[in-house]
Image: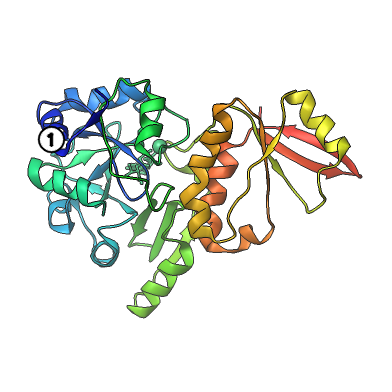
Amino acid sequence: MPLVTEEQALQILEKGDVVALPTETVYGLAARVDDDSALTKIFATKERPFFDPLIVHVQNLMHAQAWAHVDSVSRVLADHFWPGPLTLVLEKKDCVSKLINNGGPTVALRSPSHPMFQNLLQKIGTPLAAPSANMFGKTSPTEAQHVIEEFKDKIPVLDGGPCINGIESTVLKVDSDKNQVEILRPGIIHERELNEFLNERKISFSVTTRQSDQSPGHLQNHYQPSSPLILVEGSRSLDAGALSVLQKLDSKNWQELRMDEDPTLAARYLYGRLREISRNRQPMWIRLHPHWKSESLWAGILDRIEKAASGRLCLVDSQWQLILKH
Ligand code: TXA
Ligand code: MG
């Protein structure tokens, strides 16, 4: 059963069930927003707590306005970046189910650009809630096969090919009182790009990135692969001492998770590589390059790697030390 056609995906959604759909960021586990029993199935399938709010996917800005009050800066952003990997947190209208954001006052909206997703939105005529199609806290899927593996064939999947962005959308919230645009979750559309865009439009709002653990649903551990991932700081190569420290944590063969130098490619392939190595239950390490911290293009990737990691290996007084998160 798991692979379905667009027609079958439409029927599944119409009758209030969940189906995994491709987007340009990651695969989403979709259900219609106007049916609480369908929304409940998303939480149950992912074993996701209700406090973690869902993103609602709409066709375009006009449809967004039926579900939320869209302030003028958010409108300009949506007009430019939609359809695309940008999610806007907005003041919700009464028609939004309490299940979407645990009864909170806001709703997160985005218009995905994947043609299959757009096509379904148009045919079904109602927005679709869709968190990433993985068990809560685990690595997001960027290929149909990842979803099949994740849910052991239990969830129908529409195969739309590999996701081109590879990490989840940038989530932001406009604060018109403070003339601020706050990034709640970094992504492909990054801080510098947003600043440049607003400057061009002569909108004097500053863009800031919030400490991600202050955002709802953002936990210290997220996107976690099924075997340990350790961040290695500094440029010294891993010697026998470093390896013996790692072996104490996991005695199997440690693999380096190599990243592309181009952040667009690094983001596109990150989750696939994490899955590939952890499929064999192999532990992994990744070198943290200092320039990643200062380049806004890398912020989204760094955010995912830090949350996916179980700890850091660093040199303290020339001794390798492993600092685990918990
Ligand atoms: O790219 C994406 O955004 C993917 C694809 C499938 O569209 N979706 C996705 O959904 O990443 P999910 O559920 O894995 O992440 C949703 C996150 C929440 O954990 C939270 O951090 C933020 O979006 N969010 C959603 N609603 C919010 C709200 N009302 N206020 C603040 N943050 C919100
Ligand atoms: Mg997710």
Left or right of residue 314: residue 43: left
Location of residue 157 by image quarter:
top left
| Amino acid identity at mark 1 | Leu
Quadrant location of the N terminus in the rendered image: top left
Residue drawn where x is 34% and y is 26% of the image: 50
Residue drawn where x is 44% and y is 43% of the image: 215
Question: Above or below — where is 300 with respect to 204?
Answer: above
Residue drawn where x is 84% and y is 30% of the image: 244
Q: What percent of the width, then of the height, locates residue 281? A: 60, 25
Q: What percent of the width, then of the height, locates residue 231? A: 68, 42
Q: What percent of the width, then of the height, locates residue 25? A: 37, 48
- Label 1 crowd bin: few (<14), some (14–19), many (20+), radius 10 Å: some
Q: Quadrant of ligand 1?
A: top left
Pick the front one: 207 or 63: 63
Q: Which residue is mark 1?
A: 10
Pick the front one: 310 or 50: 310
Pick the front one: 279 or 83: 279
Q: How is the image coloured?
A: rainbow
Q: What percent of the width, then of the height, locates residue 108? A: 29, 46
Residue drawn where x is 11% and y is 41% of the image: 126
Quadrant location of the C terminus in the rendered image: top right
Pick the front one: 109 or 128: 128
Instruction: Check mark 1 vs ligand 1: CB closer than 8 Å? yes or no.
Output: no
Residue 51 appears in view:
no
- Circle 1 — which element? helix
Number of marks in the rendered image: 1
